[in-house]
Image (cartoon, rainbow, N blue to C red):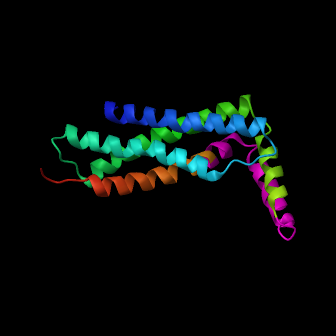
Amino acid sequence: MNKIVLKNGLFGSVIVSSLLVFITMYMKSNPEKEVSMTVGFAGMILAFFFVIWGIKQQRDANNGVISFGKAFITGFMITLIISTVYVLVWLIILYNYFPNFAEHYTDMAIQKASPDEVAKVTEDMNSFKEMYKNPIMVILLTYVEILPLGIVFSIISALILKRKTN
């Protein structure tokens, strides 16, 4: 595997995984407080800056030339590393340190719902808890949290950084 891809994927993974651990510890020690999703997405965006940096490094290593396809593949591979490490860290946290996450999340969502929405939110959250009993669904749902944002970052970065000639 390309050293540029691996290095940038691991650096991005450290950022997003550290934030995931911090947020999870905060949620577990402060069950009455809700963590803003903005914090989580900000951490993901910060981690995906390594997609931009990796594509630029790949272009520089190729004498300042990179096609859209090569730039996108570089960005996507970095994104895949970041996302996979994120999923693995979440699985470790979930099954070892926060096994009641689904119940915690469900309770928070129901408490936050307006009186008109309680029945619908309760139904949705019960469905969520059922899905979260299946490890494959946990993996898929966790990838859905991070991978699409990384793909968008890869596409935009590839469009901006592609260069056909010096």
As rendered, which of 100 and 15 lies closer to the eye? 15
Q: Quadrant of residue 138?
A: top right
As displayed, is residue 58 above or below residue 92?
Answer: below
Instruction: Work out which residue is located at the far top of the displayed protein and give it.
Output: 96
Residue 73 visible, this orientation:
yes
Measuring from the top left, give residue 77's x and y in whole percent: 40, 42
User: Number of numbered discs present?
Assistant: 0
Instruction: Work out which residue is located at the far bottom of the displayed protein and give it.
Output: 116
Q: On the rendered structure, is 98 left or right of 71?
A: right
Q: Residue at x 42, y 36 (%)?
A: 9
Instruction: Work out which residue is located at the far left of the displayed protein and give it.
Output: 166
Measuring from the top left, give residue 145's x and y in whole percent: 59, 50
Taking the magenta stretch, the answer to whether it contains residue 48 is: no
Q: Residue at x 80, y 58 (%)?
A: 112
Q: Residue at x 23, y 52 (%)?
A: 67
Q: Main secondary structure of the magenta part?
A: helix
Residue 77 visible, this orientation:
no
Q: On the rendered structure, is 38 left or right of 119?
A: left
As displayed, is residue 43 above or below residue 92?
Answer: below
Measuring from the top left, give residue 69's x and y in whole percent: 29, 52
Measuring from the top left, give residue 164's x and y in whole percent: 17, 54
Screen quadrant of the N terminus:
top left
Taking the magenta stretch, the answer to whether it contains residue 133 is: yes
Q: Residue at x 36, y 36 (%)?
A: 5
Q: On the rendered structure, is 10 left or right of 165?
A: right
State which region is magenta: 114-141
